[in-house]
Image (tube, rainbow, N blue to C red):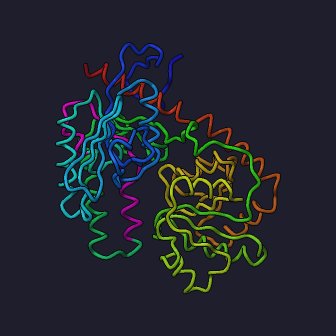
Amino acid sequence: MSISIIGIVNFPLISVKLFLEYMHIGYAGPVSLDLLNFDWKQFGAIPTGYPFPMAAFFVNGLMKKGHNVTVFTTSEGLDIPVTLKSDKLSICIARREAHAARDFFSSEREGLIELMSRNPVDILNAHWTYEFALAGLKMPVPVVITVHDYALKILYYKFREKPGFNEFMHWVVRFLMNNKTLRKGKHFVAVSEYLYNTLSQRKKNKSVIINDFFDEESSELKYEPRTKDNYIVSVCNGFGYTKNIQNAIIAFSIFRKKNKDIRYHLIGTGMEPDGPACQFAKKNDLLDGIDFMGFLSYDMAVKENAGSLVNLHSSREESFGMSVLESQIFGTVVIGGLKSGNIPYLLEHGEAGILCNIEDPNDIAAKLEICVKDDKLRNRIEDYARSRAYEKFSSSIIIDKYITLFLNILKQES
């Protein structure tokens, strides 16, 4: 049976079952090194890396399907580049500087280019449109660039936060790198239809839509029906304008007036005790009922999400929405924004979650009230969202789409 890919242009589709040879695939981008299927014991401590859990599941999935993979990533805390090898997996780690944007990530790009030149692959998949993509485009092999965000809107939101000069220039540099990547690249993947629609027609002609995914086989995502605990959760990184945690905290304080037994767990960077989210709540006398948990390991964040009554996702912009998808897999209903990028699609416009005006704390609080009090509604949405997620976003489906795309490109360019 052939595997179709939405939006692909001029590529004859072939069946995954017809593979005659396995590929050597390069992955370039952030990756959670500790989640890779790799025997770290023989090499000692795991480098800090540049965490991104889904990338590790992607690499593991490619290997499970018989392909060799070389990972190209970066890490702070290295004196020299590191290359580690096992049977089907090689890991190449370049040095990452603390203030890399000052020179357009030139040190990182040079380190990645050197590692890529020394460790050739058949095809390279670079993630995000920044240093990894620009390094990959220097290679003499086909490069597929996965676009994960809308750089122009990110720059706009960062401007709304009124950052200092250095921080703002960091995002300006990333915006310029994104534009160069989109101009020079030949093959693109957009992780959502929303993100695909932000591209110009010329760039759409070079792009396909392949969604992000969850890994149904990882032990962390094994689902067991469980009694929900008496709390709601928000999982996000950063307390800026984009994540909109300010409105979420205000909304919870409104909701809390009638629901003294329900707490609010805030997870992620910026959500630490005495972090910026806590300081905002303290300044506005909104601390009651909130647990500021800060950054948690992937396993711990999964458990917190799975045990919550509701995931309140207050973000103004999501190119995909991984924490939303993970909540759906765990059987946790999500409340998200009506106009928050890809969120309406993930929530199927209210069938697979609850949509609200995330600019209005009273509307958020009202939706929390409905969701927590109406068990039948919550259970119906949870069951439907989980079923839909398995049908559309499981790793076995998405990784096969990538493999088919890679093979078609190799056939076209051979």
Which of the 4 image quadrants contains residue 115? top left
Q: Position of residue 25 (x, y in %)?
A: 33, 30
- Residue 139 forms part of the magenta stretch: yes
Which residue appears at 31% of the width and 70% of the height? 167
Q: Residue at x 68, y 59 (%)?
A: 308
Which sits in the foreground, 42 or 46? 42
Residue in view at x 26 percent, y 22 percent: 413
Q: Position of residue 363 (x, y in %)?
A: 68, 68
Looking at the rendered image, the quarter that the N terminus falls into is: top right
Work out whether residue 43 or residue 13 is closer to the camera in this orientation and state it: 43
Query: Which residues make up the magenta segment?
Result: 134-159
- In the displayed structure image, the side of residue 334 where residue 46 appears, left or right: left
The total of numbered circles placed on residues is 0
Q: Residue at x 29, y 30 (%)?
A: 123
Is residue 320 found left or right of 223 in the rendered image?
left
Q: Quadrant of residue 99?
A: bottom left
Q: Is residue 407 left or right of residue 401?
A: left
Seen in the picture, residue 326 relative to 64 is either above or below; the reply is below
Which quadrant of the rendered structure holds the C terminus? top left
- The x, y position of residue 88, in whole percent, is 36, 29
Residue 93 point in image, percent of width and height: 27, 47
- Tell me if residue 12 is in the magenta stretch: no
Looking at the picture, tell me which residue is in the foreground, 240 or 55: 55
